[in-house]
Amino acid sequence: MSKKKKGGKRMSANKMVEKLEEFFRSHPNKSYSFKEIFKNLKLDTHPLKMLAIDLMEELAWEDFLTPVADNAYRLNVDTQVQEGRFVRKNNGKNVFIPDNSDLSIFVAERNSMFALNGDRVKATLLARREHHMREAVVVEILSHDKDTFVGTLRVEHDLAFLSTESNIFAHDIVIPKRKLKGGKDGDKAVVKIIQFPGKESKNIIGEVIDVLGVSGDNDVEMNTILAQYGLPYKYPKAVEQAAERISAEITPEEISKREDFREVFTCTIDPKDAKDFDDALSIVQLPNGNWQVGVHIADVSHYVKEGSIIDKEAQKRATSIYLVDRTIPMLPERLCNFICSLRPDEEKLAYSVIFEMDELANIKNHRVVHTVIKSNRRYAYEEVQAILEDNGVVDGTGEPAPKRDPKDYKGENAYLLVMLDTLAKQLRKARFNNGAVKFDREELHFDIDEKGRPTRAYFKMSKDANKLIEEFMLLANRTVAEDIGRVKKGKKAKTLPYRIHDNPDPLKLETLREFVTKFGYKLKTEGTKGEVARSLNQLMDKSSESANQKLIQTIALRAMMKAKYSVHNIGHFGLAFEYYTHFTSPIRRYPDTMVHRLLTHYAQGGRSGNKDHYEELCEHCSEMELVAQNAERDSIKYKMVEFMNEHLGECFDAHISGITSYGIYCEIDENHCEGMIPMRDLDDDYYDFDEKNYCLVGRRKHHTYRLGDALRIKVARANLERKQLDFTLSDDKE
């Protein structure tokens, strides 16, 4: 019998390190002697054993291993095994982000355990060697972030597959034919994973839970966007049935409990296509010459009781979602468009903040009360704007209409509307003097035909009529928050969900300061909130007429933190309010309903609400708000690509709206649609990304592309599936 050959091939140090790391990672909680290690790794020659011992010493020095005896080691779990989030990327550069860290650690596909994007995982860090990036290895998947995905079905002979828009799965989701639920090749579908990849199989097995329809259909595409974010695209029947059972009748008994504003001039001012009227304004002059202005808000909490099936659904949704061509309401249609909506010529229940103010909008007193109202008129913003301009208002100047005899004002209820505008402008002026940040954001809108196709793209600016409503809503929100939050020294404020907005990011603010200095502008980055905000406003004012205005505003916005909900009040930087909440839109925001309920509870002498419970709800509402914003943004992107798909090959004047390491974002001047010139198409030079100065610089020719630069572009590609527009630089000079 032949003797077994010992040792086999020689092994390099790198290969040995890989084998040792893999072995210890596979047994993270166990100690091994040299003898056990040699046996498991089949190291049966003296040179291989000595190499292993030397390398284990190095790995111990690098904190990858921990010596447990003179001749035994185990994995250093304390420093090497961490929990965190796995991020899968379609370029293969997956990363592990440890908890409480911004650090992104590379995870090679072979070391991913086929974890999905967003999964919570346990990972070990590989020993870091010279000239190597830090790497991690997933050793356990703790929980999956989601188990339903949206994509396009690809049906073959024996199997079907789901291809997702993001294309970040290591493998397509495999769907047995019996699990297709009638889905056909090319259909958009929602698929639930029934088997995740593991040691036995790398495949992801799923089943179709809903077929959305044929790709390209407008309804299908909008529902696909909602489904991708886990947002509801249809209303549960049980909730709609519960809404149908709610009585719309307002009883004399209920009226007797409320202040009666049915005889006071009241109106709603909303977009012309609005169906849900959250808020109304009333105005009347008092005998003492002051003005009584009522901010009346739909009394949703009267109809939607806490813990009911409707309330649970509203809480889960947390917000209405506004896609380009439709609204996905938080509440069933019967409530949001009919029973609760402050429709004209109908008696409605409201929760109101009633102000007494002089002609300079100084607040003399206020009260927060339940009311019954009857709106006299439903105005669109455009109608009110026309009345204001007919009476001498020049939009954007901040100046009210010239004073004249009440009888001489032109238009229906013109005197009262002009008075509301005058008071609103006083409030606005005071707010900016107090340090509110002045950002007038333009919003991209589309005209849509009957099939949902975009026919025109344009920017919509906020005019004086919009600002009139905005100012009184801000006042009501602030007043309600102050009533609860501002208490006498030594007393504890009762629980309330606040709308908070932290100070700008100091590093980003400093970057902005350094950047604007190059254009001759100054910016104060230290001092009180008010001083910093006023300095930002001065910057916006001074740069408003320059070519760099949009550029500076874009960078300034990036320095701002995101507003969110919390019971822990830190004030609102952007508005310069010490106390602020959301009270004025309970039809479309759940936090407003929470505030209404707490205010009613406190007015009746109730104890403070449970802080932990309400903070949890606040966090959920903040998260859902971001999700809804992303869905809304995706619907705009889709319509943008759909609109520009009709203009392939055409050339347009544009300007640079964003710069990244992988390309230049450009916004077309004519229609404000945005696309990207990929870096690979800039073939005249090799360009480096200068992040600090927001530009690309050519290495050889030193040509520079900066934010705000004018370009002539050609529409090259329009990918509806990925909602992506690609441009190229145009030679066309016309």
Image (spheres, rainbow, N blue to C red):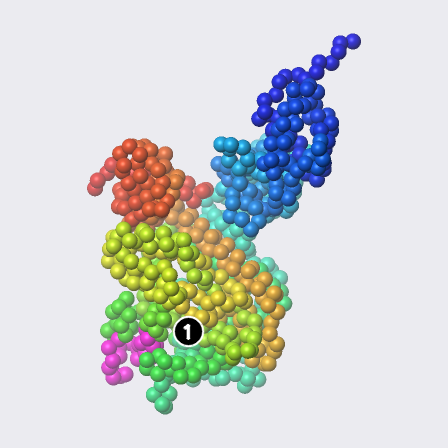
Most foreground residue, 533 or 142: 533
Q: Which image quadrant is residue 22 in?
A: top right
Counting from the top left corner in percent of width and height, residue 712 is at 26, 42
Tell me: 226 left or right of 198: left
Q: Is residue 321 visible?
A: yes
Q: Residue furthest bottom?
A: 287
* Residue at 42% in and 48% down: 638
The residue indicated by pointer 1 is 475
Placement of 564 over or under 720, stated as above or below: below
Placement of 72 over or under 652, stated as above or below: above
* Residue at 24% in and 73% down: 392
Most foreground residue, 592 or 664: 664
Q: Which image quadrant is residue 14 in?
A: top right
* Quadrant occupied by the C terminus: top left
Q: Is residue 664 visible?
A: no
Dot 1: within a 10 Å radius of its alpha carbon, few (fewer than 14), some, or many (20 or more) residues? Answer: some
- Say whether residue 407 is magenta: yes
- Say whether residue 326 is magenta: no
Q: Residue furthest right?
A: 1
Counting from the top left corner in percent of width and height, residue 228 is at 52, 48
Counting from the top left corner in percent of width and height, residue 58 is at 60, 32
- Amino acid of disc 1: Leu
Magenta span: 401-426
Count how many numbered circles sit on residues in the image: 1
* Residue at 38% in and 82% down: 357
Most foreground residue, 229 or 3: 3
Counting from the top left corner in percent of width and height, residue 394 is at 25, 69
Element at label 1: helix
